[in-house]
Amino acid sequence: MMSVTEIDVLIEWQDSQPAALPSHPTRREGLSHREAASAPRGAGSTGPDAAGGGQTVTLSGLGKAFGERQVLHGIDLDIAPGEFVAIIGRSGCGKSTLLRLLAGLEAPSAGALEAGEAQDTRFMFQDARLLPWARVLDNVAIGLEGDDARERARQALAQVGLADRAGEWPARLSGGQRQRVALARALVHAPRLLLLDEPLGALDALTRIDMQQLIESLWTRHRFTALLVTHDVAEAVALADRVLLIEDGRLALDLRVELPRPRRRDATFAALEQRLLDRVLSTPGREPEPHHPAVPASVAAPMLRWAI
Amino acid sequence: MGGVAIKTASGRGAGAVKGLVPWLVPLTVLALWQLSAQAGWLSTRVLPAPSAVARAAWELALSGELWRHLAVSTGRAFLGFAIGGGLGLLLGLLTGSQRWAETALDTTLQMLRNIPPLALIPLVILWFGIDETAKLFLVSLGVFFPVYLNTFHGIRGVDRDLIEMARSYGLSGWSLYRQVILPGATASILVGLRFSLGLMWVLLIVAETISAQSGIGYMTMNAREFLQTDVVLVGILIYALLGKLADIAAHALERAWLRWHPGYQQ
């Protein structure tokens, strides 16, 4: 899956790097702001639920090809423990493949990847993927061991507000509730790295905002490292410390989002969202239009969240 | 679907009507039959009255003969079913989960499947004579293929995404099999079970009418020798009843094991 010797070298090498500075210079374009301000959250601190804290993720020269088709080219990336990173991009750009590589669901064809132990990584799929023949509680308890497995599952279910549906069949739940069960199923393992592959894509707008708040509050509490693939720029801006744009299998943009939490969808938020959207929609290869350094107050709330 | 319309039309009373509807045709036929037998339109040699059949059944039951034959037949049916169905399940699980097993066995089994079990009767008699083994062999062979095929396709049909999810949540080996693959294949396996329960009685009837010293088939053939048409009819009705019971049992299993399935929830 990954070359062990390379990983060892990477860890040593990465330890010698200053925490806040990007270790690998990524392609900078237009809006790439990588101020070294604000050390990544979670680094060095351990919360009560930390369970080892967030996972450091390091990719170097990561590439993936399916047969002739090259999906990812030479991705270099460092993610600090406890960081919330959103990955956006047009469909087919390779963002889901990147996540599947990190989860170990695919093996890289080139480069190296360090994302910790498999049992510390949990994946939330686009569809909830609940076992239809297992009650909600048993779905949450899947893969758990020990006498207290069901009790822990019950607590996780309570955290997503579904304690009263423990005995239900998944077929009886709504789409949003199913994704909440899937979230509880992931969190009950106290993951150090949570990978989310457009888990909210199929939900209606209000349910989606509910879920975003739930994910943010659970992330704040458990301090895991989170990687969210989304096609919704607003969702990326609402949740992430850092937004990455992948274009044609390459890392095209690495933007730090400095908005305070909890984030309100105000003019600053909207302006950032608009700029990101413009960048995503600009034809690859063409220079993006120059932006004002200060955020213009007159930017209209974006209407085009689903264009990607 | 018509039942829904009736139910909305007049509420509770309609429920009883709805329950009676499936029985209307058989009851009418029975009444006509009884009538024509009493009126002498039907010869008792051809078709004795239902009351005569009922009396014959009663006498057979009282003498204990009926129970003896019934026990023998049921024993044969279930032993054959256990052997054939069990082998079908095991081989289906094996070829469904292991590529090498599919490569090695599936072509052979698909070829054998196309031979009607009844076509083997002459060969079976040559091999096993006319004793119990021949009957068990026929029943086992017949029920093997529906169970095998449906198990194989059930395992192959399990949602790949669920397996991927379960693996990424740390399940493997037996726990993956028990929690994901087997439950995912259950619906299909039960379809195979229902098919083979139907086939089980058909094959047993044929096997018992060829050669037997006991069993419902023997009782029927024996009655034919003595021109006891009423006893022949009792035998036929008992087969119908056994077939229905097997179907009810399969249905109960579906309701128990597929409770989670929206298609099986009341």
Image (spheres, coloured by chain):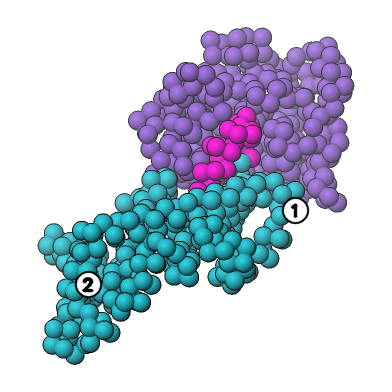
- The kind of residue tagged 2 is Val
Residue at 69% in and 32% down: A103
State which region is magenta.
B164-191
Position of residue A152 measured from the top left corner of the image (x, y, whole percent): 47, 20
Q: Is residue B68 visible?
A: yes
Indicate whether A6 appears above or below A274. above
B123, A42: nearer the viewer: B123
**Numbered disc 1: secondary structure:** helix
Residues A175 and B241: in front is B241
Chain containing the residue with disc 1: B
Identify the residue under disc 2: B53
Q: Main secondary structure of the magenta part?
A: helix
The residue under the point 71% across, 60% down is B108
Q: Position of residue A195 (x, y in %)?
A: 63, 32
Q: Colour of chain A?
A: purple
> What residue lies at 46% left-to-right and 32% top-to-bottom?
A138
- The answer to whether B16 appears left or right of A226 in the picture is left
Please rate how many residues cluster around mark 2, counting C-alpha atoms within 10 Å: few if below 14, some from 14 to 19, many from 20: many
Chain in cyan on the image: B
Q: Is residue B113 magenta?
A: no
Numbered badge on residue A211: none
Marking on residue B104: 1
Q: Residue at x 83, y 11 (%)?
A: A16
Q: Quadrant of residue B116?
A: bottom right
Chain of the residue under the numbered disc 2 shown in the image: B
Asked if residue A241 can be seen in this view, the reply is no
Question: Can residue B189 be found in the magenta stretch?
Answer: yes
Q: Is residue B232 left or right of residue A188?
A: left
- Image: B218 above or below A211: below
